[in-house]
């Protein structure tokens, strides 16, 4: 079946612009996660949704970052007034609900802020 | 979350078993040990997980010490395609809703040598 999909795969934007990154989880997966990954580092947790509820946003670096999942399926990560330090790979993952279920990762969106 | 410690890099000859260690000395009784790997720029891929018993699947075996303070991932016959960064993660299950915050470290870069 289809895996986690993300769009766009690559995004180049100028500093100060807003960007919206989309994640389409595996059908039936109620848990959805956003991560950011810098080159040579492991994924860094940003936020977590269970259905449409954002249960943990402790990893969002500042208030320019926000995420939503209004219908409990597709999620959007929005970065306002982008800065060069926001350049990274942004990854989405989904899983079934409950302990013991592994996360399935999407291909990521490579964001470059110039 | 309990922290994990892994060697930054390891080499393994093709066809030999690769044994990747992980220390998680502060693990709690209800925390699972998970292993993921990341090949080049792809998203992390689930390998295996366990609570306290040893586990085996088609990809690997997971050996957890009796005190659960360390574990070893075993790839029985490493191939060149197993060259990747391997992450050992201890996962917190927060509540009955199954919140699964995952904290990745920097992992072990395994190089399989022909």
Image: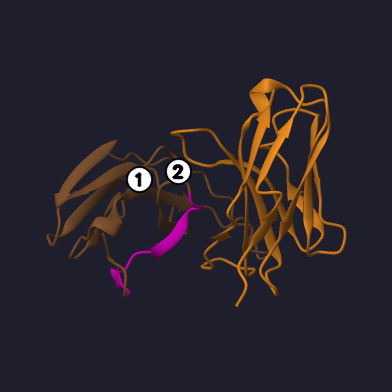
Chain colours: A orange, B brown
Pointer 2 local density, CA inside 10 Å: few below 14, some 14–19, many at least 20? some
In which image quadrant can residue B53 be found? bottom left
Q: Is residue A4 left or right of residue B25?
A: right
Pointer 1 local density, CA inside 10 Å: few below 14, some 14–19, many at least 20? some
Name the residue at 25% across, 48% down: B21
Which residue lies under the disc numbered 2? B2
Q: Nearer the viewer, residue B21 or B51?
A: B21
Q: Is residue B39 left or right of residue A6?
A: left
Element type at mark 2: loop
Q: Considering only vertical position in the picture, is A92 above or below A102?
A: above
Q: Mark number for residue A106?
A: none
Q: Are marks 1 and 2 on the same chain?
A: yes
> Percent from the top left, x then y, of residue A50?
73, 60
Does the segment drawn in magenta span residue A66?
Answer: no
**Magenta-drawn segment:** B42-57
Which residue lies under the disc numbered 1? B24
Q: Is residue B98 left or right of residue A70?
A: left
Q: Considering only vertical position in the picture, is B55 above or below B95?
A: below
- Which chain is home to disc 2? B
Q: Earlier in the sequence, mark 1 or mark 2?
A: 2
Q: Check if mark 1's residue and mark 2's residue have beta carbons within 8 Å.
A: yes
**C-alpha gap between disc 1 and disc 2:** 7 Å
Residue B50 can be seen in this image: no
Name the residue at 40% across, 51% down: B39
Element type at mark 1: loop
Q: Nearer the viewer, residue A36 or B82?
A: B82
- Which chain is home to disc 1? B
């Amino acid at each position: 079946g289809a895996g986690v999909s993300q769009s766009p795969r690559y995004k180049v934007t100028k500093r100060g612009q807003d960007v919206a990154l989309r994640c389409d989880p595996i059908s039936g997966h109620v848990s959805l996660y956003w991560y950011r990954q810098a080159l040579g580092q492991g994924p860094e947790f940003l936020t977590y949704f269970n259905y449409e509820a954002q249960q943990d946003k402790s990893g969002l670096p500042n208030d320019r970052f926000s995420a939503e999942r209004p219908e409990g399926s597709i999620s959007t990560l929005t970065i306002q007034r982008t800065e060069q330090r926001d350049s990274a790979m942004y990854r989405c993952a989904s899983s079934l609900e409950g302990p013991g279920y592994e996360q399935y990762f999407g291909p990521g969106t490579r964001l470059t802020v110039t | 979350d309990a922290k994990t410690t892994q060697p930054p890099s390891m080499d393994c000859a093709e066809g030999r078993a690769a044994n990747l260690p992980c220390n998680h000395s502060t693990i709690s009784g209800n925390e699972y040990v998970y292993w993921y790997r990341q090949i080049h720029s792809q998203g992390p891929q689930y390998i295996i997980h366990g609570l306290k018993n040893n586990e085996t699947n088609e990809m690997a075996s997971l050996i957890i010490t009796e005190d659960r303070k360390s574990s070893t991932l075993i790839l029985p016959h490493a191939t060149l395609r197993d060259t990747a960064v391997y992450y050992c993660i201890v996962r917190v299950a927060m509540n009955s809703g199954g919140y699964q915050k995952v904290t990745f470290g920097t992992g072990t870069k395994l190089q399989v040598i022909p």
